[in-house]
Amino acid sequence: MFLLRVMGFLRYIFIITTCFLCNIIVAQNKPYRTASLDSRIHSLKVESGNGFMFPPVIRLSTEDVVNISFDLFEEDHEDLSYSIIHCNANWQPSMLSSIEYIDGFEIQEVYDWALSFNTFQNYVNYRISLPNDDIQFKTSGNYAVVVYPQNQRERPLLYACFMVSEDAVKINCSASSRTDKGYADNYQQVSFRINRNDYNIINPASDLKIYVMQNNRLDNMAYVQTPQYFNNNEIVYKHNNKLIFDAGNEYRRFEMVSTQYRGMGVEKLTHYDPYYHAILERDYPRRDKSYTYDETQHGRYVIRETDFEEDSDTQADYFIVHFSLDASEMLLPEGDIFIDGELSEYRFSDNNKMLRNPQSGMYEKFMLLKQGAYNYQYLFVPKGESAGKASIIEGNKYETLNEYRVNVYHRVPGERYDRLIGTGRCVSDR
């Protein structure tokens, strides 16, 4: 009997271990995305050292840096570690080992942290700057930083994604409302040229992988391979239907930088222990309204508070922000409305899904956000689909100033990873 129990226990351990390993393998096969994986993680940002309006791209073998910051809701700091994963163009792990893409130990500790000061919500602010004295990059490509409690690599707290570019080619990008669909008010089309700069590309149609993003969104990202034509100096991508995007509308804005007064877009500011509440002005659909220009951060947010003006990273507090959308008179198709932007990590989840109030007919949501200046928009995701549509709530206005980024990857014949050989950026014209 005892032997049977031991054998049963060992079989149980084997099953659990096998399932655990299978889960790891499955998780590794999923594309990495910048994402908070623990409810205690907030305000995760990945920024260029040049400023928050620059994409998280650093040039290989230069002094460029990328800064990763986040808050952990705890009374005191925890010892955290991080690992760096090299990824292919599709953000899945490449076949390279760590010694092939970084100079330094695979596992590093997060040394830069500070406790919040004079805030109702206690938190610990952590920062990681890369490259640093302990880590240098050897190869270009996509990278994911995985942060986890020390000695608990199986419990990731977050993923933070950025890119390392060889800057070997120059990309000239443009976006216009003059599209292959005619002078339609609803669309913008991207065109770009790759200047080889003596960089050798044998067959652009098969060797290059190119991703084009609108306002850092992942859900409507375009993938192109075949150029319109190429010669010795240039590779040209024009008149490609994959590069036609819905124009969308300018992002909505609000600010909550002080506990003493209401900021832009805030209708009411109050405090119910333990949080301040920022009740935003009621939003209305803009689909049938004329275009109105507004200053844009292309979906980003910046942490800022003005009451102390010493260190917003540790002195900015957290507010419960109340969103309300009056779409009561609209007949919506089957699907869901999400609050989109960097504030929701450009993801669709329960954390940013609007819920309809049956009494008022309005769609409502509250989110816990750190003091600062925010951009956001409402995207409708039809049932069974994964890409959001601005047309339902925001409308498509050809005059909208959208930011487009072009990332060019090269799989050199015989190599086991995708090089990032260049990036380009442009803002749509009118």
Image (cartoon, helix red, strand yellow):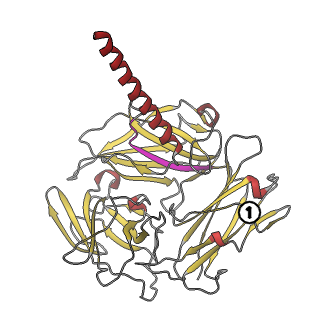
Q: Is residue 303 left or right of residue 163?
A: left
User: Is disc 1 surrounded by few (<14), some (14 to 19) or many (20+) residues within 10 Å?
Assistant: some
Residue 154, horizontal then vertical, whole percent? 41, 34
Q: Where is residue 273 in the image (x, y as percent from the top left)?
A: 13, 57
Whether 285 is drawn above or below 304: the answer is: below
> What's the residue type where badge 1 is placed?
Thr
Query: Is 400 in front, or is 227?
Result: 227
The region drawn magenta spans: 155-164
Position of residue 419 relative to residue 178, above or below, is above
Residue visible at 39% across and 31% down in the picture: 152
Label the magenta part by its dominant secondary structure: strand
The quarter in which the C terminus is drawn is bottom right
Residue closer to the observer: 154 or 122: 154
- Can you say whether 7 is above or below 19 in the image? above
Which residue lies at the image location 66% right of the left edge and 72% below the top edge? Answer: 241
Q: Residue at x 55, y 69 (%)?
A: 403
Is residue 151 something one can see in this rendering?
Answer: no
Find disc 1 in the rendering and name its residue.
Answer: 226
Residue at the left extreme, as displayed: 273
> Does 162 lie within the magenta span?
yes
- Left or right: residue 88 versus residue 7 is right
Q: Position of residue 109 (x, y in %)?
A: 43, 33
Q: What element carries label 1?
A: loop
